[in-house]
Amino acid sequence: MTSVLPATVRAVRLAAVPEGLPVPGDLSLAEVPAPVPAPGHVLVRNRAFQVFAGLRTLIGGAARDTPAPGLRPGDTLFGPAVGEVLAAADPFKAGDLVLHPLGWREYALVPVAACTPVDPALPDPVAALSSGSAAYGALTRVARVRAGDVVLVTGAAGGVGSLAGQIAHLLGADRVIGTTRSPAKTALLAELGYDAVVTAGPGTDPADFAGRLAKAAPDGVDVLLDTVGGLQLAAAVDAARTGARFALVGALDGQLATEGAGATAPVRLDAFRIVVRGVSLGGYRGPEHPEVEAEWTDRFGRWLRSGEIRFPVTRVTGLDRAPQALSGLIAGQYSGTVVVELP
């Protein structure tokens, strides 16, 4: 049976293209008509959705070649969400929990093809919103971590990085080094199994960072999982061992820049060193590896139940606090995956 919905429900919309980094006033909480069940769709009441830094690019007005389309003023934001099915379409039934891409709203009408059942093996349904599949896919398909590797993870306190270091150790890495822009997060990274932490906040001198990275990895690095780019990627090239494998999954240096629209992240790399050390460098795109999601979910569930991995998550309650949650994420106030939960 379909639940009776109110005539209007709430959603977060883009009010204006940000000038520089977004502020809460760039988003608005709007009353919109309640979605109406339709053939081939699932009506979902959202329980939680992920807040991710890539939204800065999508709302910045200059997105191009992105997996998801850019947003214009008046559009409702979107992103990974977990919700309860209210009106079902085969193969789903009312009461099922599903993962889908239409967060930032209380209720969503989602095409059946865009819904995935939440694996009951996950101890907490919110774990379905982790960014672990990107970390796992990059480490197994692009960087191909091997036993004994020294692994560097940039942006190690974020949604991808907070799981990447743990995954690298579980895949056999001997030493895992993380970077963070906040010295206050070094203790958390130690708890997550990082063997060393190098800070790189705003205004960091490239030579100073490279020197501190060299101390943390005196024999160089075999693997890089990069979510940042910028001076950290450049320093990793200098620290690369022969045959190093670099997997790029993000570009926070550009996405979190105070100027521009977060749609570019230029960096100068030492091409000579890349050649003479045989460094491979590739970007990781989930759609190119469709088998990874199920493989990751299976391993993630088993690792969570056995206690071999932790899922760091920051929970923000209430749709009305979602705009502040995006600003807080961009400002580096949170650790791990950031989710907005709807009571």
Image (tube, rainbow, N blue to C red):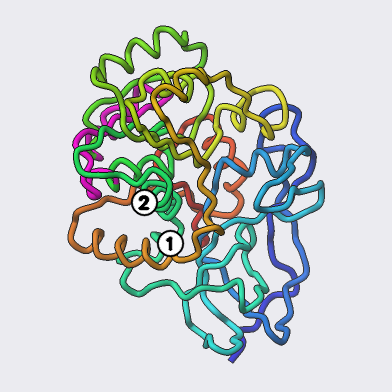
189 magenta-colored: yes
Q: Residue furthest front?
A: 276
User: Of helix, strand and loop, which one carries label 2?
Assistant: helix
Which of the 4 quarters of the picture holds residue 246?
top left
In the rendering, which numbered label is found on residue 107?
none
268 magenta-colored: no
Residue 241 appears at what percent x and percent y?
A: 32, 25
Total residue callouts:
2
Residue 181 appears at what percent x and percent y?
A: 43, 24
Tell me if 41 is positioned left or right of 324 in this view: right
User: Of helix, strand and loop, which one carries label 1?
Assistant: helix
Pointers 2 and 1 in contact (CB under 8 A)?
yes
Spatial separation of the CA atoms under disc 2 and disc 1: 9 Å
**Would you place residue 141 above or below residue 290 in this image?**
above
Name the residue beneath numbered marker 1.
292
User: Looking at the picture, which amino acid does disc 2 mark?
Assistant: Thr
Mark 2 or mark 1: whose residue is earlier in sequence = 2
- Residue at point 54%, 54% (across, down): 318
Which of the 4 quarters of the picture holds residue 10?
bottom right
Badge 2 crowding class, 10 Å Cα cut-off, few under 14, some 14 to 19, many 20 or more, is some
**Would you place residue 307 above or below residue 167 in this image?**
below
**Quarter that holds the N terminus:** bottom right
Name the residue beneath numbered marker 2.
140
Q: Residue furthest bottom?
A: 1
Tell me if 339 is positioned left or right of 86 in this view: left
- The magenta span reads 168-192
Residue 310 appears at what percent x and percent y?
A: 27, 50
